[in-house]
Image (cartoon, grey):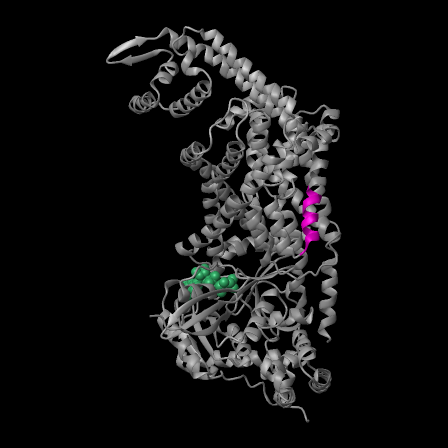
Amino acid sequence: MRRKLKEIKVAVAGQPNSGKSTIFNLLTGGRQHVANYPGITVEKKTGTYRIQEHKVFLTDLPGTYSLTSYSLEERIARDFLLQEKPEVIVDIVDATNLERNLYLVFQLAEIGIPLVIDLNMADVAKSRGFQIDTEKLSQEIGAEIVPTVGNKGRGKRELRQTIHKAYESKKSPRRLDYGKELESILKPLGQFLSKDANFSKRYPIRWLAVKLLENDSEAQRAVKKYSTNGEEILSYVEEERKKFISQYEEAPEKSIAHQRYREAEKIVGHCVKQIRTEPKTLTDRIDMVVCNRFSGLIVLLGTIYAMYNLSIVQGYKITNYTWPLLAGLQKFLVLSLPPEGFVFDPLLRAMPLGVIGGVIAVLNYVPIFIILFALIAIMEDTGYLARMSFILDRVFRYFGLHGQSVLPLVLGGVYVGGCAIPGVMACRGIKDEKARLATMLVVPLMNCLAKIPLYVLLLGLFFAATKGIMMFFIGTITIIIALGVAKILSLTILKRKESAPFILEMPPYHLPTIGGVLRRCLERLGIFIKKIITVVMVVMCLVYLLINFPGLSKERKAHYNSQANRIKKSFMKKIGEDNPYTKLLAGDGLINFTKYRNDYRAATRGVEEEKTKKVIEQKFRQRNFEFFKIVKKGKYELEGKKIKDKDAKKVHKTYKKVFNQRRELRAEKKKETIKGSFLGRVGIALEPITKKLGFNWQVNIALISAFAAKENAVGTIGVLYESPPTEREDRLEKRLGEKEGGWTPLHALAIILFMAMYPPCIPTLLMIRVESGSTMWMLFATFYPIILGIIFAFLAFTAGNLLGFSGLKMMITIYTLAIVFMVGVGFIKRKEKTVQQKTAQDEIHR
Amino acid sequence: MDGLKVMPLAMLPPGQKARIVSLSGGRGLQAHLYGMGLGLGSEVMVIYRGAPGPFLVAVKETRLAMGQGMAYKIMVSLENKVEQARPLQQPNNL
Ligand SMILES: Nc1nc2c(ncn2[C@@H]2O[C@H](COP(=O)(O)OP(=O)(O)OP(=O)(O)O)[C@@H](O)[C@H]2O)c(=O)[nH]1
Ligand SMILES: [Mg+2]
């Protein structure tokens, strides 16, 4: 029997990094971002739990220092509280920082909704020597108080019960008394506002009165929009404000803030005793080293190097162990597809083959991502990430970025390996609109993991001796260019965007929790895998269609079929009528044998151990004994005797020739198909232009297909340079080397640099659209990298050839140019400082 | 305000305590700063000062990182008695 539960709406509010998400997770058992970095939660998240006959709907709000309308978070939190009208507000208060947190408590109390104070971080407060008299505190604030230790799960039951009690009692919290001078304005204003009954139902009057007196623009808008006598009210408030200012020589908002401070100070004085003061906390001592200009830089570089080494280098080693699993999965999936034909394969085989290959290739990166995301989560959780913002703000500021641009850039792949999608999403935390857009637009320039295989392929082929140093240049040139581009963007098209000064709370260091790190890591991994499974699949299908259609004409198809028949016929003739195997291989027999032989070779490839080999052989022997004789070249055992079968040997030898002929025929057909396909035509049409960049039509096609998802580049090159589906990458290198003997390192360098600048993949672009809220920015993010890429490829190829430079020399030249460019733009227009100094001086007199 | 040594927070020597006397910047920003604990009369101390920036500033238990621009928007005074000079303490004749 199920009773219908009554619902209670509860909001979790509080200042940033006070532990809201931790408490939210604790209460609901939900999964929410937790990190020791202020401003992680930007969207609101909901979860539920049951208590007695009630179902509690909990909403985790973004952290806000106060309830102004300054930042996105504050507006989200405020709109939720006012419009959704939760029945209880739980304010998560950081016990180590009570005084500051009370500033928000007072404002929440003004809304009039029953309030529960969760005194979180009780453990830290205790260890720092604070003694908090919660009973007294509860009396002074006029709301229930529950001490908790969120990350250890302490206080959960009490908190749930107190929330429930607050809901039942429906008692409004006590409101702050702002003192005679202010109250003499606030009281009549409140009465004035409540004249309109409809309006006073919509908004908490006390809260609105205070906000109006504070000259809050959102509050003014609300009055104008919803109150019947809005204009009248606003002019009344304006009048009162003027009077106040002339009387006390101070803006009311300042007096209001001051009054809150005084009250907070008073309450803390009454209720908090510090029995032991540490002259310098551990955090401060660590910060002396970590935030220092010199030692901080060393720590920073060390951290980035360690991240690179652990995730990319070690992660790559792990993929050696995981690859066989994935390859096994691939083999298994391929088995379920319809069988291949002699020249033409059924569409239902060819298309899924491409899709499966693409997805598996990307899944291969998963171990690297797990390590990378876990490390980033650890940096967030310990509090080091916030210090990275601190150290790098100095540098970033020169380029129109912001200290908080660090996280997006790291996620995007600062050296090598990252993913632009979580990177773009992480831009949300940046308060400065200008820097936020600039960061979002340059994050895709970072080296996402999917760009790496193409680098590795080409470097291995053309720069074998200098591979390491080349990788370093490529890995770092992108950040150099990104900084320069960010600066140019902020000087030009972002000029008019609002800019906010950098100010960020540095949370105290603490040990990361396993749960928190795991949760964040898996969340980001989930996003990445979702991308593969959905987007890459769709895109691979699309690419397949684009490079296979409209397909060959009837005549050409007939041509290939007759060629196939010729091969079959000559095979039959060569083995001779009297060969016992002739009948077996007639008609479909040949293609059946081909499939058998392919399977046999796939099964025995790389098998060293005698025992396993025997088992496999036994299996194939049972599957088809006659075929087995052929693949064993006529040497097999029968009833304990060793048998040499000359006929079978002959068939095998002849078949090998047929096999090669077939392969060539199929390759020829494929190439012709692609050349005539939609994408092929585009690639060929572009060749006259891209020749200057060193790209032939094959490369053009590969690069175009990479637009969908970068991991496609190597795959498409593989197709164009004829790789049967089962072959591995190392073979591709060889083929590419043979077929493109005319390529020089400059060709390769041009391709690599173009890839480095390359437009974001489609999923990232969609994310940019979501996060910037504009299609225009998405289009911009698509096209400017192409222009950049063309410039760099042109430099590398055409200029390189003119100068007669080697690949490495050209790389160094371009690298130097990039640095000069970056430093050059970095110094443009740094007058801001003096302007701000001036305004600061002006303000004193106000 | 004679006798008080007023200067931007950016100029305050590290380790020296001071009180905020004024904030500049948009009204929205000011309100936001109040919430972060940077209100008039709050005691602040520069812990680390990167020339030209950023600054690591202590406000009670909070540690704030701020850019140079921000540090120039906050005016502080070395004098400790600023708070007593607040206008609301001395009721005006209404
Ligand atoms: N020692 C201790 N750490 C805690 C406690 N509660 C939370 N934390 C840690 O404090 C950090 C911040 O917690 P979050 O839950 O992400 O804080 P938040 O308020 O949601 O932060 P934003 O969403 O960024 O505003 C995390 O590293 C938590 O593990 C506590 O009671 N004691
Ligand atoms: Mg949170």
Q: Quadrant of the C terminus of chain A?
A: bottom right
Q: Position of residue A62 (x, y in %)?
A: 54, 65
Residue at 57% of width from left, 75% of height from top? A82
Total numbered labels placed on residues in the image: 0
Front one among A164 and A471: A164
Q: Position of residue A226 (x, y in %)?
A: 66, 79
Vertical order, A197 against A752 (above or below): below
Residue A344 visible in the displayed image: yes
Vertical order, A345 against B64 (above or below): above
Image quarter of residue A707: top right
Front one among A730 and A93: A730
What secondary structure is the magenta-colored segment mainly? Answer: helix
Front one among A551 and A733: A551
Q: Position of residue A243 (x, y in %)?
A: 72, 87
- The residue segment tinted magenta is A774-785
Examine the structure image and report whether residue A439 is included in the region drawn in magenta: no
Residue A128 visible in the displayed image: no
Front one among A266 and A732: A732
Would you say A433 lies left or right of A166 here?
right
Determine the residue located farthest toward the bottom in the rendered image.
B94
Q: Position of residue A612 (x, y in %)?
A: 31, 25
Q: Quadrant of the N terminus of chain A?
A: bottom left
